[in-house]
Image (spheres, rainbow, N blue to C red):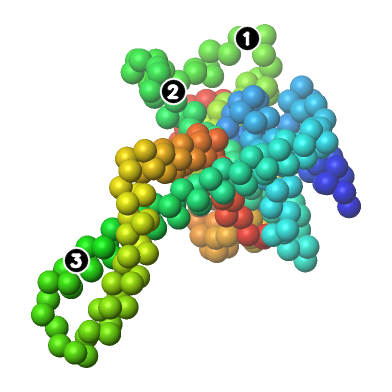
Amino acid sequence: MKDVDELDGLSESTLRAAMRLDKDERPRRFDAVAIVAAAEHRTALEQMLRAVRGMALIGVSLGIEAVVAVAAFNLLANVDVGEPFGLALSALAVVAQQVAVLGALTASPSVAVAALAAVVFATVYERTNRRESLNVRAS
Amino acid sequence: MTFEDVVREHQDSVYGAALRILGDRDAALDAANQTFMKAYRSRASYDPSRPIKHWLLRIAVNEAITIGRARTRERARHAPESDAAALPDRAATPEAETLGRESREDIRAAVARLPDRYREVVVLRYFNELSVDEVADVLGRSSSTVGVQLLRGRQLLRKALAGRSV
């Protein structure tokens, strides 16, 4: 069957012939063992990086929550509230006292800087190595 | 079938597709290695009811396109503008080359310069010799989209090759 491009001198058969691998283009045999070893090495490294990044993100988010909770408590403490809110406020005060410890910890510049540096390092490392999670569906 | 069998059976398809997309052997080797590594690492997501060749080619095409884009960015960053604009002149191939070889090189160079979406379908259709439906399956596009992209890709190729003895 003639294809639509034959009149233009660029037939499907011409394209197929041009695209075929020449003998000198064929690759040497790929080393499946080396590929598996490299893939497993990368996987272990990635898991470690993910764990570091996850812990750093948890630290950062806990710090933010602590700061918000302390700020909310300070705000509410100044409000003249009636008896119905008394219990809720005292409960909040208990929680805030616990969270304040975390808040004090995250207020330390070294903790915040270390956590942010870990996030940035892990992200940059993954990007430079094109390690974004593989989004491949079996087709 | 072991992973080693998979690599042995499909290495030409994977490497060849990457080579035709990238037009560079080193980059194609890199893309093929990355493809097999990613396939190994995400083997749990492979659906065995579907052809493994399509799955591998999908990864390979994505890898090749990613590598190609990175190389283009790299070249644009490092090469002076005058160099970046200078494309290899295939018509100046030494006369010792046969006409057939020269024509093939012209076509391959033109394919390697097609926009990504056309290059993918042209390579899968004419190098891997997949049907339009199979190309659609590999790329996750509709068959009609692939059909249109093939047509457009060939139009661009004809335009690029116009005036050359292909």
- Disc 2 marks a residue whose amino acid type is Arg
Residue located at (77% from left, 66% from top): B49
- Judging by the rendered image, the residue that carries numbered circle 2 is B75
Residue located at (63% from left, 59% from top): A137
Seen from the viewer's position, the closer of residues B138 and B96 is: B138
| Label 1 neighbour load within 10 Å: few <14, some 14-19, many 20+ | few
Any mark on residue B95, and which?
A: 1
Please tell me in which quadrant of the rendered image residue B28 appears: top right
Check if mark 3's residue and mark 2's residue have beta carbons within 8 Å: no
| Label 3 neighbour load within 10 Å: few <14, some 14-19, many 20+ | few
Kind of element beneath mark 1: loop
Reply above or below: B37 against B27.
below
Any mark on residue B79, and which?
A: none
CA–CA distance in space, label 3 to label 2 = 56 Å
Kind of element beneath mark 2: helix
Seen from the viewer's position, the closer of residues A58 and B86 is: A58
CA–CA distance in space, label 1 to label 2 = 29 Å
Percent position of residue B97, x then y: 67, 14
- Disc 1 marks a residue whose amino acid type is Glu
